[in-house]
Image (cartoon, rainbow, N blue to C red):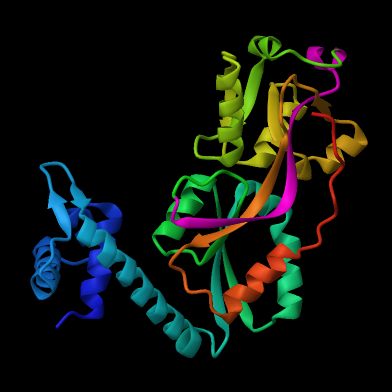
Amino acid sequence: MITIKHLQIFQEVACVKSMSQAAKNLYISQPTISQKIQEIEDEYHIKLFQRTHKTLLISEEGTSFLKYTNRILNEIDEMVDYFLNNNGNKTIRLGATLTVGCTIIPQLLKQINQKYPNICIQITVDNTLCIENLLLENKLDIGIVEGDLRNPKIIREPIIQDQLVFISTPSHPLTKYKTIQTSQLENYPFILREKGSGTRAKFDQFMNRYKVDYQTAWTCHSWESIKQAVLNDFGISIISVHMIENEIKDGTLQILNIENWDCHRLFSICYHESKELNEDLLEIIHESENFSHCPILDYVC
């Protein structure tokens, strides 16, 4: 008989693509891992993985089996949360990218908590690629991101307008130009987010399109570090206007008008296509879609 333990082991192996690593993560022996995978294959007359000398590749049958496994284990997690961990309160696992987490999430959660006090929300804040992977692994129920998602299994619904802008201090040499040519950007260092960030991806796409060989002075995982680096004249950056509203108002940062730069984008709520949207999740999605955030100014880009 196939048990929950079988499914948990299969899910972990599918995630890490290694039986030895799965054994370490689950604190059980590798022979036990192999045995449980074999028992699943024998029970359903399928082959879950294609084995190579370096890694495990999940088969087409394995991919279908993983879809059901994720759904079953998620239902079990929800049952445990409901009856044991939260005394009837429902836990929603919400992922947010760093820009979203630093701007709209605090106000959105406050609004949700006031309206739905019995819904407990656990937050994970990371870059777009990480949030996408967690959704695919069923380690998050929903996410709010600003970047483009690669996997077609993730459903994405735009909810909030955003603008990305190039910034510097008012004393920067480029501020004297009404419009800055893309070629001029090659002469100055940039303070940038890490690879995997939605903001970084949009920046790289733009610079590659216009063949700008830019200099990276700093790579940061923190928006506050980026702002401080720009404020201290270590370089130029690209950032959401939601992040710099105060600095623009007090004149410590200035927006640069870059030729051909399309600065508009949308924050989106996203979830796996096979995710069962229960009443609580639908309420969170509805509140996110109708979230009233102070509108941003339409800066020239």
The answer to whether one can see residue 22 in this image is no
The picture quadrant where one finds residue 29 is: bottom left
Task: State whether the magenta stretch is mostly helix, strand or loop.
Answer: strand
Q: Residue at x 70, y 10 (%)?
A: 184
Q: Position of residue 110 (x, y in %)?
A: 74, 69
Closer-to-camera residue (192/291): 291
The relative height of residue 260 versus residue 140 in the rendered view (above or below) is above
The picture quadrant where one finds residue 204 is: top right
Q: Residue at x 58, y 44 (%)?
A: 147
Q: Position of residue 289 (x, y in %)?
A: 71, 63
Q: Position of residue 100 (x, y in %)?
A: 66, 51
Closer-to-camera residue (285/110): 285
* Quadrant holding the N terminus: bottom left
Residue 169 sits inside the magenta stretch = yes
Q: Residue at x 73, y 12 (%)?
A: 181
Bounds of the magenta segment: 152-176
Q: Position of residue 28 (x, y in %)?
A: 18, 67
The answer to whether one can see residue 167 in this image is yes
Q: For this view, does 229 lie left or right of residue 44?
A: right
Q: For this view, does 170 lie left or right of residue 122?
A: right
The relative height of residue 121 versus residue 298 in the rendered view (above or below) is below
The relative height of residue 70 versus residue 170 in the rendered view (above or below) is below
* Quadrant holding the C terminus: top right
